[in-house]
Amino acid sequence: MGTVASSPLRRRTPAGTPVVLFRLRVEPSPDDPAVGGCVVAVAALGERVADLAEGDTVEVEGALTERRWKGAGGVRQSHFEVLARSVSVL
């Protein structure tokens, strides 16, 4: 459970499948600093969450995935994100 920290970014795959990305801010406890992460919602779920707004409180269920690519100069880079199975607005 956390707070939407950025407006959702809408994209489509080359095949036309909707993909929506947004940042989620999570505060584990009052004594711990907040952390954030990127959430990816695909297809029908992506269409459903595209209208989320910064500040909305949501519960996300999904799998932590690592995306890898080669950046400028062939430098390997990676990014962790949550591939959402469900997103519920609270």
Image (tube, grey):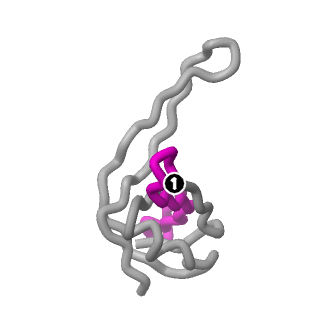
In this view, the residue in front, 29 or 85, is: 85
Mark 1 neighbour class, 10 Å CA radius: few under 14, some 14 to 19, many 20 or more: some
Q: Is residue 73 left or right of residue 29?
A: right
Does the segment drawn in magenta span residue 22? yes
Q: Is residue 25 left or right of residue 81?
A: right
- The residue most toward the bottom is 90
Q: Is residue 57 left or right of residue 59?
A: right
Range of residues picked out in magenta: 13-38
Query: Quick check: 72 above or below 44?
Result: above
Q: Quadrant of the N terminus?
A: bottom left
Q: Residue at x 37, y 79 (%)?
A: 88
Q: Residue at x 47, y 71 (%)?
A: 47
| Picture coordinates of residue 16, whole percent (x, y) | 48, 54
Query: Quick check: 70 above or below 11?
Result: above
Does the segment drawn in magenta span residue 36? yes
Q: Quadrant of the C terminus?
A: bottom left
Q: Residue at x 59, y 62 (%)?
A: 10
| Picture coordinates of residue 19, whole percent (x, y) | 49, 57
Given the image, on which type of amino acid does mark 1 rest? Cys
Query: Quick check: 32 above or below 57?
Result: above
- The residue most toward the front is 15
- The residue most toward the top is 73
User: Circle 1 is placed at which residue position?
Assistant: 38
Q: Residue at x 64, y 69 (%)?
A: 7
SS class, disc 1: strand
Query: Quick check: 52 above or below 71?
Result: below
